[in-house]
Image (tube, rainbow, N blue to C red):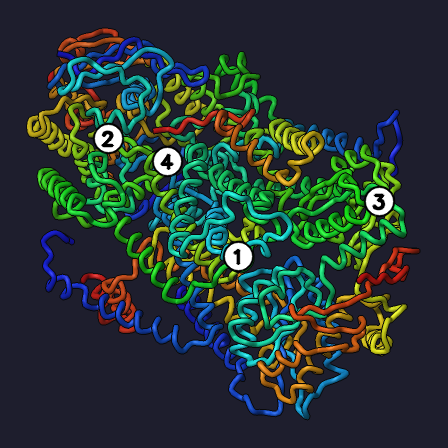
């Protein structure tokens, strides 16, 4: 795709489906923001936030092939930055009621967007500090080291009473996150990821995933490239953490226990390591699926009064479902493919040809 | 003894072996020669099911081997000395030999003695970790280890790989000795010269297909084979 | 073949999901003769034990008083998995999907705080059961509660230590990762310092983390400081272990704590070592403070004959339900706004745990707390303390 | 003038000496070959030169065209060495398997990007220009190497021979002065080997390259090398022109083998 | 077992002495199994080289299962010892200790029994000593394991007693 020579009209021509799709999406968001009830809005917001985090994680794990498990920590940094800087100054005394907020922070209040970006930047900076020792490590060691760092971040937040209010957490964060914010930023992140992945940097990421030694022999600086990916991923995650804080209105360290990271790991594995569209799809599947299955927690699911239908049962079913999906689709739903119009067309054709059986055993594949 | 019919093997989309037929009669030395990547190793590895064959059949004394586990195949009396020796570096020499007899329940003493008599160097280094041995010693150990399972068919993948000529000669002498003792041998060699000299039957493998076959002496005398595989340039 | 199977499986599951969803969302029947009340509690996860006890109390109250304004009251229970994000969606779901007119819950202040914004923005009142953190109702006109607050409890225990135990020096052991524990510890020490007038009355503060099992390090330091009393609010398991290890180290000072101790696990874990441990709590089944309390205890023992004693949080759950129904009755309507206003005006409601008057913050002003002690492996009424 | 020089390089792994006193001197523009039995340390020598291993002792010196003095590249990171003008292929092909042919080659141009990742995301004019130039260069290369029609294929779906070509194309995309080929003819039949001979001649003149290769096919080696180094047990046992090597008794004994018709 | 006896001012619970002894004995048994028995030999072989181990007639799956069995068994013994000292059982009590055990193994060097013991001792001592000497830092106790891990991996990427791995190119 040679973007340079592309005129406006040809751009429209090749991308009209995408443009129409985006338009519909915007209308959908507007309608949802206006008419959907707060329950639905909340879930949709979570979907968008999880999409952002998972994309950040997939950039590192899926595209660059570095097994990192620090997501919860980066989210915490973003969330706390937003919390610390957006709680109205006059409310702070009542929030920090055990020990007052540190004086150098107590009177700084930032607009939401500023705090959000700052959260992303802090998160990326911490990623730099973490990455410096960790990115030299091999796969499983990297995973455990990043997991450890994410725990350290949480423990620090628990203990820095005058900055983070310790275990009490911070309450009273203005709940600014709405569908426009979350989907707007999710869209930006998606577009940025697509553009990044398809640039020279993206190819460098993928080359490291494929073969570190060959990548190095091609002049790719392993450490620098991994670090770039790691920091961008952390930036996205930090921003998502900020949105998360502004959605819930409260943060505390327990929210960011390392098990939170497993949710995102699950999303990217299910969606396909190295697939942007797969990640988006599975973020929605996981978030909505968990809510959907809530009926399994009720004692009278399906009108049956079985003792197994008790709180927690939906998690059992949900885990089973995921295991089944991963068993049948080894590489997740999308593998490393992307859901493009071409991909959809091919899929439909292959299904058609399979239904048509003998008429075209390879006819569908040829085009 | 071993019969391969129309064997096809593919690795991740690339066909390495494209339908070969070959036969290893009882008590003979059979060799496969060919360039790197021609599919020799793949053939051997598919016989013991270290790589999965796509189609075809491999029978051993009439029993189909395809579909059996590696351990089951080894249990039938087939063993492979893999390319690059692959001794267990952390295990001692003696342990390496013992592990070769993993499937056996009887007394190993005599066999170990026999192997030590064939390779006195191994006896000297009995308590050393195998990883500290030199290349030639490791190759001896790999052969000795394979012999510990008392195989009826011994397959060797490039036993001369990386060894000094003198040691290569020694290895080939051992192969001959083993054959005289009644062991059937299937051998892959880059050093086609040596291999053809001791082989009763030889096959030439080129990009996954058998292009020539004959007795060792026949192929050794063949001009085209000489040109392609015997390493010496035509100018000589 | 595999794929076909997987596809079929997914399809069936989608269908069941859809049918399940269809079944549970009957929010359209607004004007029916049912009033729905949402209960959002942690039924799985770290806080599950507490959540279940509260639900028991609420359900018992519902059985005893199933109707209000001539309509049937239906409880809709949602699990918030001890997780904040889940707590907010669970609350939102109850309000939007199930159309409840008010909420009850949740065990764990942080979960209630998280749901606070949802009830506030949807203008649906909520009654907290045992969430003692001041921040639950702070700045939120739609959140109320039936329990006393941590500051009150801190003052109660400080008074108890100072007056009853005649302590001059205390040591504090707090669970740093637990907001309840650090909050209570803080209120206790403020109050105790005020009572003694001694800036250095707190001779040692030990910190531990949720899930810790070895406290010998902290305890050795405390032993050296030789306090008269040790105040150790926190999770029941860790607290019981602290007491065990303290006794093993030869620390003999009385060890006192807060309401979270009052669980059977505390005694099973602590065994003989927790004999004599003292805690403040909301309710005591052997000495009910009110008539309602007597009724509750006998009904509870009927409903759950296998239980040895009645958990205070169950009593609070019972009170929360009745307080809400009382408010609905007074409002004369099931309109959430009307219920909120009626709740705010509650004066001298006679609950099982005492008389409740809702103050301008939405908190229950209670003047009495129960002090219990572990005696012969049972939580036994020791005293009731009133603080102004 | 020498382009690459190794001085007394020794490479030890634990107790095993893989390369012992390696002394190589490659002149600018020449085609040198490294031969020796399997396991003699040839690939290890390549790995030391390209920075994959840091030698136990000794030094590797490179004199690139745009520098006056030679640079000590001993133990430098592989990517930096590539940046200085040494590119390589691998004995057991190491392509980026999941990526397309075009992407494989484009990755090799990444070291030259002069814009940061933000420009890449925002597709600034500079980034677009850079991308277009890189594409052009890679298309030119692929065209030269006869792979242009396959540019959108997954690299692992290529036949063996073409994978070898692609590896060379990829190495060339780093704009090297010195190209290291590790057994380029491995797995090729005599006819393919002949083609490869022509191909190496061609790229050498087209790209003005110095080539250093490891090879077992003696036909190929004897035919095209200017100089040959023979390695055995990590030691350089001989060096010289093809004729000298062919008649060197030591080499015949260690490597070429005492042939029946010799 | 938990009633202490006194040596001067020192109070010691019998379990506190018993646990290290049992741990040490188990380590010796484990080392014996790994180094001296046939199945241990097979384990070491499988760890290095799957394919070649198969060629020896070793049933890989059986070896892996028995390794898993031994590992889980040891974990169970560990848990029993834990509960002798800290008598309380919770469904999620294994999460943090499990993570720390993994860290201990990494610190000591994966694949090295003595390393695991060393790693475990280092972790355990540093946690206890930190709490004892810097009570103000108690809140950071769980972080110390990770700090040690990262510091050690920075200087010794294969752990204290781990072997260097050279990737074949």
Q: As rendered, which of B24 and D117 lies closer to the eye?
A: D117
**Which chain contains the residue that carries disc 1?**
A
Spatial CA span between label 2 and label 1 = 66 Å
Q: Which residue is mark 4?
A: B25
Chain ID, mark 4: B
Q: Nearer the viewer, residue B156 or D119?
A: D119
Relative to E90, say whether D6 is above or below: above
Q: CA distance from mark 4 to mark 2?
A: 41 Å
The residue identified by callout 2 is D89
Decide: is D202 above or below B174. Answer: below
For numbered disc 4, what is the local secondary structure? Answer: loop
Q: Which residue is mark 1?
A: A90
C-alpha gap between disc 1 and disc 4: 94 Å
**Residue farthest along the right direction in this orientation:** C376
Instruction: Work out whether disc 1 and disc 3 sit on a shared chain.
Output: no
Viewer-nearest of discs 4 and 3: 3
Tag in front: 1 or 4 = 1
Tell me whether marks 1 and 4 sit on the same chain: no
Residue E7 is situated, as x and y percent measured from the top left of the image, at 87, 26
């Amino acid at each position: 795709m040679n973007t340079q020579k592309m005129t406006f009209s040809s751009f429209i021509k090749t991308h009209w489906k995408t443009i129409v799709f985006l338009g519909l999406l915007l209308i959908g968001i507007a309608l949802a923001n206006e008419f959907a009830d707060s329950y639905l809005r909340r879930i949709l917001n979570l979907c968008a936030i999880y999409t952002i985090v998972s994309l950040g994680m997939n950039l590192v794990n899926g595209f660059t092939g570095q097994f990192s498990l620090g997501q919860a920590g980066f989210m915490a940094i973003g969330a706390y930055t937003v919390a610390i800087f957006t709680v109205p100054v006059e409310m702070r005394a009542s929030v920090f009621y055990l020990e007052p907020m540190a004086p150098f922070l107590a009177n700084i209040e930032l607009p939401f967007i500023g705090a959000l970006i700052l959260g992303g930047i802090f998160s990326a900076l911490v990623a730099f500090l973490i990455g410096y020792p960790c990115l030299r490590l091999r796969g499983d060691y990297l995973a455990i080291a990043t997991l450890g760092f994410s725990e350290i971040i949480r423990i620090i937040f628990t203990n820095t009473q005058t900055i983070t209010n310790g275990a009490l957490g911070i309450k009273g964060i203005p709940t600014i996150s709405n569908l426009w914010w979350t989907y707007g930023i999710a869209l930006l992140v998606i577009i940025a990821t697509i553009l990044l992945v398809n640039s020279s940097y993206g190819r460098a990421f993928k080359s490291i995933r494929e073969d570190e030694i060959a990548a190095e022999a091609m002049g790719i600086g392993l450490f620098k490239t991994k670090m770039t990916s790691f920091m961008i991923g952390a930036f996205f995650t930090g921003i998502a953490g900020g949105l998360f804080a502004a959605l819930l209105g409260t943060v505390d360290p327990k929210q960011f226990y390392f098990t939170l990271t497993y949710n995102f790991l699950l999303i990217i594995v299910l969606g396909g390591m190295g697939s942007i569209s797969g990640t988006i799809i599975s973020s929605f599947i996981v978030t909505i699926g968990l809510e959907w299955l809530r009926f399994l927690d009720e004692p009278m699911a399906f009108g049956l009064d079985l003792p197994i239908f008790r709180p927690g049962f939906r998690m059992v079913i949900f885990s089973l479902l995921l295991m089944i999906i991963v068993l049948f689709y080894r590489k997740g739903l999308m593998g490393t493919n992307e859901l493009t119009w071409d991909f959809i067309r091919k899929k439909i054709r292959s299904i058609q040809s399979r239904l048509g059986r003998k008429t075209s055993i390879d006819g569908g594949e040829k085009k | 003894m071993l019969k391969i019919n129309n064997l096809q093997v593919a690795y991740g989309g690339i066909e390495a072996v494209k339908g070969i037929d070959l036969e290893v009669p009882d008590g003979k030395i059979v060799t496969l020669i060919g360039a790197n990547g021609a599919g020799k190793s793949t053939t051997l590895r598919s016989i013991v099911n270290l790589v999965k064959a796509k189609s075809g059949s491999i029978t051993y004394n009439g029993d189909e081997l395809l579909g059996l586990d590696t351990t089951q195949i080894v249990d039938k009396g087939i063993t492979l000395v893999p390319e690059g020796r692959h001794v267990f570096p952390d295990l001692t020499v003696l342990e390496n030999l013992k592990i070769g007899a993993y499937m056996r329940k009887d007394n190993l003493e005599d066999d170990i003695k026999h192997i030590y008599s064939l390779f006195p160097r191994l006896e000297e280094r009995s308590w050393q970790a195998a990883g500290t041995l030199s290349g030639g010693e490791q190759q001896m150990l790999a052969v000795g280890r394979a012999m510990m399972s008392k195989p009826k068919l011994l397959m060797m993948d490039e036993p001369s790989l990386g060894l000094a000529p003198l040691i290569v000669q020694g290895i080939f002498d051992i192969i001959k000795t083993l054959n005289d003792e009644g062991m059937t041998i299937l051998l892959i060699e880059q050093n086609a010269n040596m291999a053809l000299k001791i082989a009763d039957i030889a096959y030439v493998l080129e990009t996954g297909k058998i292009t020539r076959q004959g007795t060792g002496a026949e192929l050794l005398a063949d001009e085209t084979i000489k040109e392609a595989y015997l390493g010496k340039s035509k100018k000589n | 073949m595999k794929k076909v199977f997987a596809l079929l499986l997914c399809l069936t599951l989608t269908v069941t999901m859809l049918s399940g969803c269809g079944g549970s969302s009957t929010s359209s029947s607004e004007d029916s003769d049912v009033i729905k009340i949402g209960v959002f509690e942690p039924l799985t996860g770290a806080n599950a034990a507490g959540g279940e006890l509260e639900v028991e109390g609420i359900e018992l109250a519902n059985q005893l008083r199933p109707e209000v304004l001539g309509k049937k009251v239906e409880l809709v229970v949602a699990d918030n998995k001890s997780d904040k994000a889940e707590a907010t969606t669970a609350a939102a779901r109850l309000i939007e999907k199930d159309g409840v007119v008010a909420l009850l819950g949740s065990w764990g202040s942080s979960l209630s705080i998280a749901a606070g914004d949802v009830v506030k923005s949807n203008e649906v009142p909520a009654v907290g059961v045992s969430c003692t953190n001041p921040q639950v109702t702070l700045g939120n006109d739609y959140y109320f509660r039936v329990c006393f607050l941590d500051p009150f409890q801190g003052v109660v225990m400080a008074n108890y230590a100072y007056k009853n135990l005649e302590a001059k020096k205390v040591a504090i052991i707090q669970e740093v990762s637990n907001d309840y524990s650090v909050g209570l510890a803080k209120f206790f020490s403020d109050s105790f310092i005020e009572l003694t007038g001694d800036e250095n009355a707190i001779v040692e503060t030990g910190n531990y983390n949720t899930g810790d099992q070895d406290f010998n390090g902290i305890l050795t330091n405390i032993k050296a400081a030789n306090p008269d009393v040790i105040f150790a609010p926190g999770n029941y398991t860790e607290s019981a272990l602290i007491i065990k290890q303290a006794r093993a180290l030869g620390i003999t000072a009385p060890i006192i704590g807060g309401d979270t101790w009052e669980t059977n696990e505390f005694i099973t874990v602590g065994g003989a070592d927790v004999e004599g441990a003292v805690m403040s709590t909301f309710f005591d089944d052997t000495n009910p403070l009110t008539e309602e309390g007597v009724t509750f205890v006998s009904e509870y023992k009927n409903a759950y004959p296998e239980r040895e004693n009645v958990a205070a949080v169950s009593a609070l759950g019972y009170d929360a339900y009745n307080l809400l129904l009382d408010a609905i009755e007074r409002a004369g309507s099931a309109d959430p706004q009307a219920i909120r206003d009626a709740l705010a005006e509650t004066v001298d409601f006679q609950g099982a745990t005492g008389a409740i008057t809702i103050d301008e913050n939405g908190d229950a002003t209670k003047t009495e707390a129960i002090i219990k002690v572990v005696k012969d492996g049972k939580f036994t009424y020791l005293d009731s303390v009133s603080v102004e | 003038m020498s382009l690459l020089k190794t001085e007394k390089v020794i490479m030890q792994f634990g107790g095993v000496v893989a390369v012992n006193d390696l002394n190589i001197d490659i002149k600018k523009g020449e085609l040198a070959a490294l031969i020796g039995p399997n396991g003699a340390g040839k690939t290890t020598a390549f790995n030391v030169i390209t920075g994959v291993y840091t030698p136990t002792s000794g030094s590797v010196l490179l004199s690139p065209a745009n520098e006056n003095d030679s640079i000590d590249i001993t133990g430098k990171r592989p990517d930096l060495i590539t940046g200085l003008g040494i590119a390589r292929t691998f004995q057991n092909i190491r392509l980026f398997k999941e990526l397309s042919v075009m992407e494989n080659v484009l990755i090799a141009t990444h070291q030259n990007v002069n814009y940061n990742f933000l420009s890449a995301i925002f597709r600034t004019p500079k980034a677009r220009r850079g991308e277009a130039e890189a594409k052009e260069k890679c298309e030119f290369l692929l065209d030269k190497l006869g792979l242009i029609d396959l540019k959108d294929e997954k690299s692992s779906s290529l036949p063996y021979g073409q994978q070898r070509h692609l590896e060379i194309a990829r190495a060339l995309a780093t704009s090297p002065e010195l190209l290291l080929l590790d057994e380029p003819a491995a797995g090729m039949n005599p006819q393919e080997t002949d083609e490869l001979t022509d191909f190496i001649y061609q790229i050498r003149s087209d790209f003005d390259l110095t080539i250093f290769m490891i090879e077992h096919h003696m036909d190929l080696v004897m035919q095209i090398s200017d100089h040959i180094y023979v390695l055995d047990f990590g030691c350089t046992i001989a060096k010289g022109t093809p004729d000298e090597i062919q008649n060197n008794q030591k080499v015949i004994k260690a490597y070429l083998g005492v042939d029946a018709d010799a | 077992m938990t009633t202490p006896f006194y040596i001067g001012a020192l109070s010691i619970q019998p379990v506190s002495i018993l646990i290290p002894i049992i741990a040490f004995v188990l380590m010796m048994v484990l080392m014996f199994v790994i180094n001296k028995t046939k199945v241990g030999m097979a384990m070491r072989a499988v760890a290095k080289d799957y394919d070649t181990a198969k060629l020896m007639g070793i049933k890989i799956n059986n070896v892996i299962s028995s390794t898993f069995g031994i590992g889980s068994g040891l974990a169970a013994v560990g848990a029993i010892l834990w509960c002798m000292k800290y008598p309380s059982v919770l469904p999620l009590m294994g999460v943090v200790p499990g993570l720390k055990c993994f860290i201990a193994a990494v610190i000591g060097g994966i694949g090295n029994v003595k390393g695991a013991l060393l790693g475990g001792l280092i972790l355990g001592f540093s946690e206890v000593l930190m709490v004892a000497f810097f009570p103000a830092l108690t809140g950071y106790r769980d972080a110390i394991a990770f700090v040690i891990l990262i510091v050690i991996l920075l200087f010794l990427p294969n752990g204290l007693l781990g072997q260097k791995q050279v990737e074949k190119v």
